[in-house]
Amino acid sequence: MSRPSPEAYEQGRGMDAHNRAMRSIRGERDDEHQDPHDPTHVWIDRDRTPGGVYDSLTVILNTGGCRWARAGGCTMCGYVAESVEDGSVTHEALLDQIDRALEHERERREEPCELVKIYTSGSFLDEREVSAESREAVARTFADRERIVVESLPDFVETDRLAPFTDRLHTDVAVGLETATDRVRHDCVNKYFDFADFERAAARAADAGAGVKAYLLLKPPFLTEAEAVADMTASIERCAEHAHTVSMNPCDVQRYTMVDELHFRDGYRSPWLWSVVEVLRSTTDTDAVVVSDPVGAGSDRGPHNCGDCDERVERAIKDFSLRGDPSVFEQVSCDCERTWETVLEREHAYGMPLAE
């Protein structure tokens, strides 16, 4: 991976010791060529939004990557490894990526998806990653859709950067907040901004005519299972005051991250799927759409239970995320719930994980 410039380090914005450790871990990766004309990932799914359930096209653009990740970045995020080596992608190359995403969609559907989600594994609104010219072109391309989601850190949420989208269609800004608790965000996730920065970004989005979708992280490193559940429940309730949708992402173990280092040394276990169920159940009445898509569910590196019930519980979680009906969880049970309950009761930070 390319070494970031001194400016990219942004010393003092996070924990510098964390960043030094993260740069060392990321440096273990063998550089792999990323084609700047190919999007990193494209897929079609279904999503629940304030406007209803839509078929969705998700595009992760291959850009220069998150500037904070190049400084060292978040303890759980390995997406910077998928960004281009020289840290920039031309306007023409980004348009090629959009064309290939549309080709992927046409091969699988007769009609375009109503919802489009544009991510960069960084910030789509950061002009170091995506220029104003490219944003305008993306907005024109998807102007005939019902709704679009663009991802950004709070710093870059500005009216002029959103205008190409809000002038054309329903627009949401997805912000990787991770938690409403500043200490957890700083010390466990190593993210530099405060909840107050998220509040200000949400207000700017509203002034621009855009909605807000908050991404939260269930069980960052250094939290017990019980602490993670309590933090996530409180975070969803707090975020609902500023975001119409909250997406809870159970932490999965990505390569070349601090979480990966901890997991390799038996110091981290991804959250139980029962914890996801517990949080969704307890926030059903929250004034926001609450969803979850457990990446890697059932695997050792993803959220999992005992192995026997993982697939059934994952299906229930995805069903809830589309319908918002907690009764789906009454249809799944397993003896391992008792183990999970014991973990919640007895696991302590100095001796975790208590059970695999």
Image: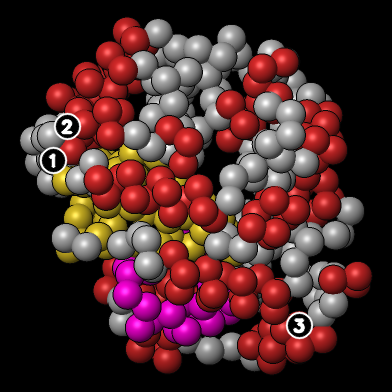
Q: Amino acid at mark 2?
A: Phe
Stretch of the chain drawn in magenta: 274-295
Calculate the distance from the C-alpha at mark 2 to the C-alpha at mark 3. 47 Å
Q: Nearer the viewer, mark 1 or mark 3?
A: 1
Q: Amino acid at mark 3?
A: Val
Q: Which residue is mark 3?
A: 343
| Residue 25: numbered disc | none
The residue tagged with tag 3: helix, strand or loop? helix
Please check the rendered image and state whether residue 227 is part of the magenta-colored stretch, yes or no.
no
CB under 8 Å between discs 2 and 1: yes
- Give the residue at x 78% y 61%: 222
Quarter of the rendering occupied by the N terminus: top right
Query: Does residue 222 appear anywhere in the picture?
Result: yes
Q: Is residue 222 left or right of residue 341?
A: right
User: Does 157 sit above or below residue 338?
Assistant: above
Q: Is residue 295 left or right of residue 305?
A: left
Q: Which residue is mark 1?
A: 169
Q: Is residue 229 left or right of residue 255?
A: left
Please check the rendered image and state whether residue 284 is part of the magenta-colored stretch, yes or no.
yes
| Residue 142: numbered disc | 2
Q: Amino acid at mark 1?
A: Leu
Q: In x, y percent, where is residue 164?
A: 20, 28
N-terminal of the pair, mark 2 or mark 3, is 2
Query: Does residue 42 appear anywhere in the picture?
Result: no
Q: In x, y percent, where is residue 207?
A: 25, 45
- Give the residue at x 46% y 41%: 154
- Give the residue at x 28% y 34%: 159
Calculate the distance from the C-alpha at mark 2 to the C-alpha at mark 1. 9 Å
